[in-house]
Every structure is written in structure tokens, then in C-alpha cells.
Image (tube, helix red, strand yellow):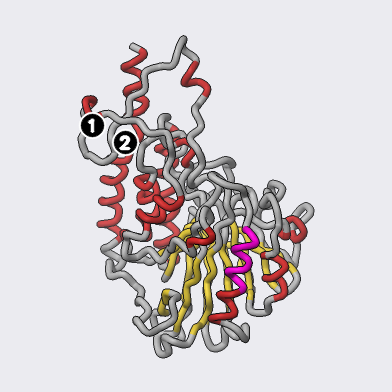
């Protein structure tokens, strides 16, 4: 009886993934009736700078970005609650994409809850999380959060019966669910493996980043370009891995040095605006945070918890705060915060908790960015799961 129960419990995540793939396939067929499936990006020509280019659709049009933060796919995968939250998260993303029709999507960390995932390849959950953008042909990029490669945490209630119960997992490399082909893996899927899988998709603009910065992986730059002048940057989007999970929650001095050298290489005169993305807020967010309610000059709708910052500061904020081309930094991590506040010469912003996984029962949504050219401007607002919009702010 116990063995049978545990077989059902451990097979449930894979059966759910199969069901979810079917659901996504149907929903993408429906959404593609309204959205072209052609991938809406251009690769940089061979003789261009190393940075990959995202080209604005037409001259004079705004470039719109949707930020999906803290989706936490795969959380409590062995329960009825967990898989249902993933379905709700897909609905939130599809609703936002229907309303906003963005040019680009950024997955701002904690895409999955790896510490709850006991199948060999957690990329199966990662692929489900990125499917709303992928199925619509919208290019995307991602950064890692503290849960994306966290070690598996054994639930205490699994051990309530005398002795360790029999555990049954099915191989993820096969469609078969035959008990004879069972294989368990609780080692987790590392950052490099997750990134290797993601960048197989043509629409992914994510990157391993410099090898010398590993185990910090998601460190790279993208260039937003004008369609008429592809070699003339409109903005640079910087992505940094803020750690957590398999190593400390920190942006290292090595990452700061890499940023400085890269900025000197591609934007020495600070003429081109720069926008920064990582997952865990820096300690500067504590200094900028509203004390109680959100009041001007801050803009937002929820301020329900304290800033959970990185473990240490190693120079990145000192450098960014002095750099005139840096317009704003965007983070996730705190589900109960969605404000933007000025800090010295730039803005510090939270995204909005998008996923139904993770803590908190605040309504879900996504932060939207809008970049315009000639003159440059950066606007933002939050699109909620019910379609409402709030917290509009001009950041540059």
C-alpha cells in the first residue's frame, strides 16, 4: 500500500508535465491565430560587435519589454496544489502577452523551484515556464535566481512512516512511464545545464557569460538597435547573476570588473542608455525603500515586506550609481514589493510577482518597460492578471 502510494506521488510531476504540454499546445494554437509565429528578432551580422542585437520593429516605434518574475514552476510538484499553480502562472503570462504584445520578454529569476524538483532534468519545467513567449515567437532572455539551481529539499512528511518509503521516479529521457524504466535523481540541475538547454531555442537571447565568472553564469549584454541604423545602439541591456542556490547571494567583484571593462569597450563615453537586470536586490534597495506607504517620488502599489538583499556588496552599486548612462535596475525576489524609487542618479525598481508558485497571495502581474528612441525615454507600468494597469512612471 505504501509503495503504491509513493509510486503515484512521484510519477505525478511527469504526468502533469505531459498534460501541461498538451494544454500549452492548444493554447498556443489559439493565441497564434492572433500572433505571427515568426521570430521577431535579427541576429547581429558577423562583422558587428560581440553583443547580440535586438532590432526595434520599425523606426519611431516603441520597444516594449515584459518582465516575468518569480514564476517558481515545479514547486510542490508531488501535490495537487503545485501543478495547479503552474497552470495559473501560464494564464497570467498569456494574459499579459495578449494585452501588451511585447517585443521582448525577460525572465527575472526563480523561474523554477529547483529545491522541490526531483526529476533528472529540471529544464522540462523551465521550458514550460518560457513556453508563452516561445509559442508566440517572442524572443526572450533570462537571469538566474536563488531557487533555480537550489539543492533538493526532502519534505519531512515523506518520512512520517516507519523507515524511508519506497520512491519511484520515471526517466525523463523517455516518453514511457513504464515502472521497469524508473530512475530517480535528486542531484538537481545546475546553472550551466539549465542555460545549455535554454539557448538551444532560437528565440532565446540568454548566454553563459564569461567562463571566468562561473559559477555566476547569466552575465551578458544585449544591444537594442534601430531598424534603420542597426550599428547605432538605442540602449544596452545588462544581465547579471546575483547568485543564490548553489553559491552565495552576491554580485562579485569579478562581475563588477567585467561590467566596467565591457562598458568601456562598448559605451566608453556613456552616450548610450543602459538598463540593468538581476534577481536579488542589492543593499541599496534598503536605503531607497519606502518606510511605510508608497509616496512620491516612489511609485508602486504594494510595500508589504522588508527588502531581502544580497549577502554582501562588492562594488557594483558604487560603480552603477556614478555611471550617468545607467537609467534603472530591475529585480524580483521580494514577492510583496513592486515599487520603483529613485536612488542617486538612477531608479531602483522591483518587477511584480508573476507566478502562483512561491509565497504570498497578492494579485499577480508583470512589469512592462517601454523604450523609445529620438529622443530616448524609458517608461514603465504594471499590467495585472485581470488586465488592469497601474504604477505608471517615467524613468528617463
Q: Are marks 2 and 1 in contact (CB under 8 Å)?
A: yes
Q: Which residue is mark 1?
A: 177
At a point 32% along the width and 40% down the height, the residue shown is 17
Residue 143 visible in the current orientation: yes
Q: Which residue is mark 2?
A: 14
Above or below, 14 relative to 193: above
Q: Quadrant of the N terminus?
A: top left
SS class of the residue under badge 1? loop
Q: Write the start and end of the magenta stretch as one range.
A: 252-260
Return the residue nearer the eye: 210 or 70.
210
Q: Is residue 211 left or right of residue 274?
A: left
Task: Report the predominant secondary structure element of the magenta stretch.
Answer: helix
SS class of the residue under badge 2? helix
Q: Position of residue 239 (x, y in %)?
A: 53, 65
Q: How many marks?
A: 2
Q: Position of residue 389 (x, y in %)?
A: 55, 62
Q: Position of residue 123 (x, y in %)?
A: 37, 47
Q: Quadrant of residue 274?
A: bottom right
Give the crowd class for mark 1: few <14, some 14-19, many >=20 residues within 10 Å: some
Disc 2 versus disc 1: distance between alpha carbons?
Answer: 9 Å
Above or below, 395 relative to 98: below
Residue 294 visible in the current orientation: no
At a point 63% along the width and 54% down the height, the residue shown is 250
- 265 falls in the magenta region: no
Q: Is residue 332 left or right of residue 16?
A: right
Q: Is residue 375 left or right of residue 342?
A: left
Return the residue nearer the eye: 251 or 277.
251
Amino acid at each position: 500500500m505504501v509503495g503504491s502510494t509513493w509510486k503515484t506521488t512521484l510519477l505525478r510531476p511527469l504526468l502533469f508535465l505531459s498534460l501541461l504540454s498538451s494544454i500549452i499546445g492548444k493554447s498556443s494554437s489559439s493565441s497564434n491565430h492572433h500572433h505571427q509565429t515568426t521570430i521577431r528578432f535579427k541576429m547581429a551580422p558577423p562583422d558587428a560587435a560581440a553583443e547580440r542585437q535586438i532590432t526595434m520593429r520599425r523606426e519611431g516605434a516603441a520597444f516594449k519589454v515584459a518582465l516575468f518574475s518569480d514564476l517558481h514552476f515545479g514547486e510542490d510538484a508531488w501535490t495537487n496544489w503545485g501543478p495547479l499553480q503552474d497552470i495559473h502562472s501560464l494564464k497570467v503570462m498569456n494574459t499579459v502577452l495578449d494585452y501588451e504584445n511585447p517585443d521582448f520578454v525577460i525572465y527575472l529569476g526563480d523561474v523554477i523551484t529547483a529545491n522541490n524538483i526531483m526529476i533528472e532534468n529540471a529544464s522540462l519545467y523551465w521550458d514550460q515556464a518560457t513556453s508563452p513567449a516561445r509559442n508566440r515567437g517572442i524572443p526572450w532572455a533570462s537571469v538566474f535566481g536563488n531557487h533555480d539551481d537550489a539543492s533538493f529539499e526532502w519534505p519531512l512528511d515523506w518520512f512520517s512512516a516507519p523507515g524511508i518509503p519506497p520512491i519511484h521516479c520515471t526517466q525523463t529521457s523517455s516518453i514511457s512511464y513504464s515502472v521497469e524504466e524508473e530512475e530517480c535523481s535528486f542531484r538537481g540541475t545546475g546553472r550551466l545545464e539549465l542555460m545549455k538547454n535554454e539557448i538551444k531555442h532560437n528565440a532565446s537571447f540568454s548566454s553563459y557569460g564569461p567562463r571566468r565568472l562561473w559559477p555566476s553564469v547569466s552575465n551578458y549584454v544585449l544591444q537594442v538597435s534601430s531598424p534603420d541604423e542597426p550599428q547605432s545602439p538605442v540602449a544596452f541591456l545588462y544581465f547579471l547573476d546575483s547568485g543564490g542556490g548553489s553559491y552565495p547571494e552576491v554580485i562579485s567583484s569579478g562581475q563588477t570588473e567585467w561590467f566596467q571593462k565591457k562598458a568601456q569597450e562598448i559605451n566608453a563615453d556613456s552616450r548610450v542608455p543602459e538598463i540593468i537586470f538581476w534577481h536579488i536586490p542589492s543593499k541599496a534597495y534598503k536605503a531607497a525603500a519606502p518606510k511605510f506607504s508608497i509616496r512620491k517620488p516612489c511609485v508602486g502599489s504594494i510595500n508589504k515586506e522588508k527588502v531581502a538583499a544580497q549577502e554582501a556588496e562588492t562594488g557594483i552599486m558604487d560603480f552603477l550609481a556614478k555611471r550617468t548612462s545607467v537609467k534603472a535596475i530591475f529585480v524580483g525576489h521580494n514577492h510583496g514589493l513592486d515599487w520603483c524609487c529613485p536612488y542617486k542618479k538612477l531608479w531602483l525598481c522591483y518587477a511584480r510577482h508573476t507566478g502562483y508558485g512561491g509565497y504570498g497571495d497578492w494579485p499577480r502581474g508583470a512589469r512592462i518597460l517601454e523604450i523609445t528612441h529620438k529622443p530616448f525615454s524609458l517608461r514603465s507600468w504594471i499590467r495585472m492578471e485581470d488586465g488592469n494597469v497601474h504604477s505608471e512612471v517615467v524613468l528617463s
